[in-house]
Image (tube, rainbow, N blue to C red):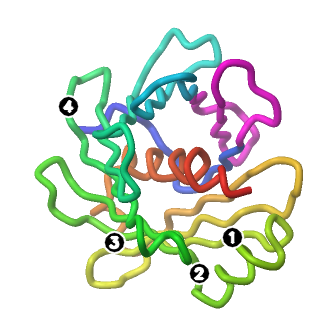
Amino acid sequence: MTTLPVARHFVAKKAMFSFLGASFRIFGTDGSLQYFIKQKAFKLKEELNVFADEGQTQKRLTIKARQVFDVSATYDVTDVVTGESVGACRRQGLKSILRDSWEVVDASGGLLGTCKEDSMFMALLRRFIFKQWLPERFTVADPAGNALGTIRQRFNPFQLAYDVSFDGQNNASLDPRLGIALVVLLLAIEGRQQ
């Protein structure tokens, strides 16, 4: 059972300036802060902590890389409140060089869904010509290819921000904690390309 209340629509933003590690915020559609995420600096293994408050007193999730360096890195998601292993988000390393691609798996490794950048053509334009001037769009789908949601980058060359919508018909198959983890990883890992 999930202990993390998550709306179907939210906005995720990377802080413009950070001291000793990156930080991210997830806002409800009304602009209220839902979650504050802190990425630990100088860690050999990537680690991100999701808090219910900006004071970092109410930790909810931990997102942690399994290995120090891996092009196809897997990030385990743990619910800190229950101690439950929720699942993982796995970057498709070689595929992600030209077009960002992720897999979302449950705690036993079963595939729950994928998250892919909109198209190879658009991805290549972003990487080699337009850089931050052409916003990214990701589609989250279940293993059968049914849409679970979209993650759309806002046009803003100064701050990375995503409008997130998990409105798909089958979105009950994707634990909302994994949805949050996926968006955080896109901000943290794919956001480095900006």
Label 3 to label 4, Cα distance in Å? 23 Å
Query: Which sits earlier in the primary sequence, circle 4 or circle 2?
Result: 4
Q: Name the residue under label 2.
A: 118
Q: Residue at the location (57% across, 23% down)? A: 41
Amino acid type of the residue tagged 2 in the rendering:
Asp
Residue carrying label 4: 84
* Amino acid at the residue labelled 1: Glu
- Nearer to us of marks 1 and 3 is 1
Structural distance between the alpha carbons of marks 2 and 1: 7 Å
Residue under numbered circle 1: 136
> Horizontal and vertical percent for residue 162?
68, 56
* Labels 1 and 4 touching (C-beta < 8 A): no
Range drawn in magenta: 14-37
Q: Distance between the residues labelled 1 and 4?
A: 32 Å
Please tell me in which quadrant of the rendered image residue 148 appears.
bottom left
Callout 2–callout 1 Cβ contact below 8 Å: yes
Tag 4's secondary structure? loop
Vertical relation: 143 (above or below) 50? below
- Describe the element under mark 2 as helix, strand or loop: loop
Marks 3 and 4, the one that precedes in the sequence: 4
- Sequence-wise, the earlier of marks 1 and 3 is 1
Would residue 172 appear left or right of 125 to someone viewing this image?
left
Query: In the rendered structure, which amino acid carries the disc numbered 4?
Result: Glu
Name the residue located 36 percent from the left edge and 59 percent from the top edge: 72
| Closest to the observer, 81 or 77 | 77
- Pick whichever of labels 2 and 1 is earlier in the sequence: 2
Q: Mark 3 points at which residue?
A: 170
Tell me the quarter of the picture where residue 154 sits.
Answer: bottom right
